[in-house]
Image (cartoon, helix red, strand yellow):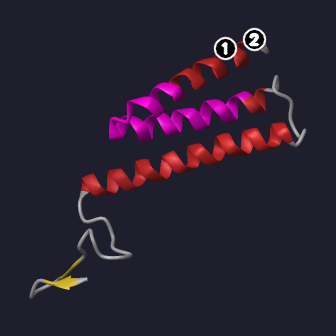
Amino acid sequence: MWFNGRIPVFQTGDAGSIPATRSEMNKTITNFLGWIGVLTILVAYALLNFGMIQSQSTLYQWLNIAGSILIIIETASKKDFQPMTLNIVWLLIAAIALFRTF
């Protein structure tokens, strides 16, 4: 943390600093959402592989839909098109599978 003579100012390079601008805060939020999305898809995959849910279950499809949406938000904010495309396709597959359960 640096001191500008009047008030303490957090610099973006400081370890443990608070985001100083709205843009930095938005990046922090979207990064957090991306990690939540990754964890959501991993939980769905683990539940499926440990036999706790079935691949045709609505819970499995909703977890995949939610996770992919969160990752799409994060990757779109970074203009990272390869993982964004992958998650759009993932979302479409999960949405179609969910629709077929009804």
| Residue at image location 48% in from the left, 53% down from the top | 32
Q: Answer above or below: position of 14 versus 30.
A: below
In the rendered view, would you say 102 is above or below 6? above
Q: In which quarter of the image is the C terminus?
A: top right
Residue 76 picture location, percent across and down: 38, 34
Q: Could you tell me the amino acid type at mark 1?
A: Ile
Q: How far apart are marks 1 and 2 (CA)?
A: 6 Å
Q: Quarter holding the N terminus?
A: bottom left
Q: Residue at x 50, y 38 (%)?
A: 71
- Percent across and percent down for residue 100 are 75, 11
* Side of 22 where 69 appears, left or right: right
Q: Is residue 60 left or right of residue 91?
A: right
The reply to whether the C-beta atoms of the residues labelled 1 and 2 are less than 8 Å apart is yes
User: What's the residue type where badge 2 is placed?
Assistant: Arg
Q: Is residue 27 left or right of residue 43?
A: left
What is the residue that sits farthest to the left in this orientation?
5
- Magenta stretch contains residue 75: yes
Instruction: Report which quarter residue 99 is drawn in.
Output: top right
The magenta stretch spans which residues? 61-86
* Residue under label 1: 96
Q: Is residue 25 above or below residue 5?
A: above
Secondary structure, magenta segment, majority class: helix
Residue 20 lies, in percent from the top left, at 25, 65
The residue pinned by badge 2 equals 100
Q: How crowded is mark 1: few (under 14 residues within 10 Å), some or many (20 or more)?
A: few
- Identify which residue is drawn at 35% across, 51% down: 27
Q: What element carries label 2?
A: helix
Q: Which residue lies furthest to the front in this view?
A: 82
Image mark for residue 40: none
Reply yes or no: does residue 50 show up in magenta: no
Q: Residue 45: where, in percent of width, then height?
A: 74, 39
